[in-house]
Image (spheres, rainbow, N blue to C red):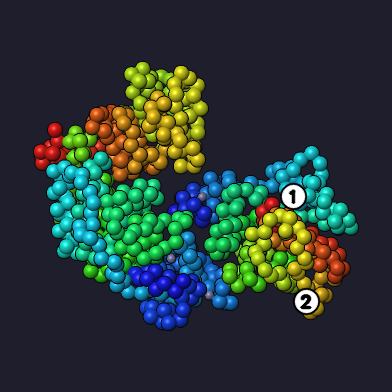
Amino acid sequence: MNDRTVLYGRELVLRDALAQFTDDVIDECAKKPGFVSIKGVLRCNRCQTVLSLKQPYPCICGKRCFYCRECIQLGKVRACDELVTMTEPNQFSPVQKPCLKWNGTLSQQQKEASIEINASLAANEERIIWAVTGAGKTEMLFYGIGQALDQGKRVCIASPRIDVCLELAPRLQRVFPGISSILLYGGSEEAYRYTQLVITTTHQLLRFNEAFDVLVIDEIDAFPFYLNTALYYAAEKARKRVSSVIYLTATPDKETQKKIKRGDIKASILPARYHKHPLPVPRAVYSKTTLTDGSIGKSAVFNHICRLIDLKKPFLVFIPTISLMEKVAPLFKTIFKESQFEWVHSKDTDRKEKVMKMRRKELDFLLTTTILERGVTFENIDVIVLKADHEVYTEAALVQIAGRAGRSVAYPDGEVTFYHQGWTRTIKRAISQIKYMNKLGKDKGLLI
Amino acid sequence: MNRCLWCGSSVTSVISVKDFIQFKIIEHPLCEKCRNNLNRLENHETCKGCSRIYSGQDYCPDCLKWKRHYPSYEGCHYAVFEYNLFARELIEQFKFTGDCETADLFKKEVGAFFRKNMKDTIVIPIPLSAESFSSRGFNQTEVLLESAGVDFVCVLENNYQIGKQSRKNRAERMKSPQPFALSEYHKDIVRGNNIILADDIYTTGRTIYHAIELIRSHEPATVNSFSLFR
Ligand SMILES: [Zn+2]
Ligand SMILES: [Zn+2]
Ligand SMILES: [Zn+2]
Ligand SMILES: [Zn+2]
């Protein structure tokens, strides 16, 4: 209680702060209103979202007040609330330099990117890292982060996905053993404390205010488009006025690709995988089967699956929606009676176990929704996408899905097939993005 | 494009020709998937006493126990949805996170219930303890009724203290003393009138039966009770 360091660079609702701090500490805080009116439009001052409520509700203050629905999971911000913060002083205990304890090696392209990242951090500028799936993007950040921490800078690594944060935190704690760090996400048991290194879900960034000298944001493409502005606002708010932001992506959207090509933002492009083999280029195949009736038995999809089963080649089958999955899975049970397979989706509580079974090679194949689009790697697999023209598959999603194949050094190849009922711009763009990266890798001499 | 008030996914409204002709297009605030997670009790066989999903006999064992406790009570408890896992999530968001707009999700069903079954009946919401009210800032039952456009009168006081109801175990809750009081000033509202008590959830029935007991001591014509979830 009353530990003022937890206010450094943080933004709290005054009402909540009053329960934790004595008046003299509260008096030292900078304050701002919970809501602001800009040109007659009310916005939440924590997340800048335009008020969505049609009417105010009975409030803790005794009157009726609006509140923000958008960021309510971080604690309710009411129109009668104030937000408080204390300036970030970079008050960390000195570390033995260098704080980075890692003796791995970087590939040629990782080395180059690492040098560029260091330069951007030193110059407090923004940089985007466009690294293909399997390029090893975390390792090339190590030196830059280490250098910043040595200089007493406060560093944050944010990802939209909890899975990524959970995997990243122990890796970073291992290579920076002397640095205080914390992992933040909704539902975490650990109470917030003031640390030099912060690993967090992007949502939690809204709880900071001008806190970080270095902010790394992973998987900026994982956001649906309508959430992008909220993300950029959260990042702008959490970084210091003079600071550096590094954006990581494997599949930048069209706008970002344009910005990179025009040179509007400094970029490091890593077109080659760590194992120096090119990315598997998807094959697009027209298939008119609805997947849910007898027509599937005569389709190219069916023949393809039979062939892979005969070859004993493990594979993933992507299906766009849970409802289609629920129709296809029982049908597959009847037509592929002899085969071992499972199906997973976001609502599946046995997801982890089924993925492990696939990893242990106990399954012939795995049916999945886009839930396995990112992060998960399997050795030596082929990838089949059904209804690749469905709207859930964005360009980024298709590139990520294709990126599941050929990940390991032992099996750098893998076949990727997009079955579709209409050749969409999205499919075309995804394939040309993959080809572009392969060409770049080849031109730079990074591929075998 | 409209987004589901609960999960944020886009809502494509299904419009029947009849609705279209009558310009009666009311967008449901929930997407189809979320709507299917809510389980309407009217589609099931339920206990005549408390509306829980129950078949075989008219009254569930809990209600039989209450009948021994209050032998002369003839009212019953109405509820709209089963209190399942999804309902628990919604209530969590509504009461504890404080997202009052969650009430909008039920306004259609709650409004329809009172308009259809409770004409000439005075609706009295169960009040929160002072402690819960000051930490929450609102009574979820009042917000529910208000969103549904149901008139109600707040005549009960809740003098309950120490500890929170939701943290108690069942046995502790069952023997808790009468927490409610009706102020002198409001006694006339009850006498000779039809009363329905309203709450958000019915769990053990202890809370509602305390309120029923108190109301009955002031000679109403009838007393029944209602909750959104059972
Ligand atoms: Zn907000
Ligand atoms: Zn207020
Ligand atoms: Zn929904
Ligand atoms: Zn019953």
The answer to whether residue B67 is seen in the rendering is: yes
Q: Secondary structure at mark 2?
A: loop
Measured as percent of width and height from the top left, residue A375 is found at 34, 42
Mark on residue A41? none
- Comparing A246 with A90, the one in front is A90
Q: Which residue is mark 2?
A: B183
| Residue appearing at x 39%, y 64% in the figure | A193
Q: For residue B217, which quarter of the picture?
A: bottom right
Disc 2 versus disc 1: nearer the observer = 2
B126 sits left or right of A225 in the view: right
Q: Which residue is drawn at the image coordinates 69% and 43% (left, top)?
A: B43
Quadrant in which the N terminus of chain B is drawn: bottom left
Residue nearest the observer in this picture, A23 or A321: A23
Q: Label 1 amino acid?
A: Ser
Q: Residue at x 29, y 58 (%)?
A: A178
Mark 1, residue position: B51
Across and down, in percent, residue B57 comes to: 81, 41
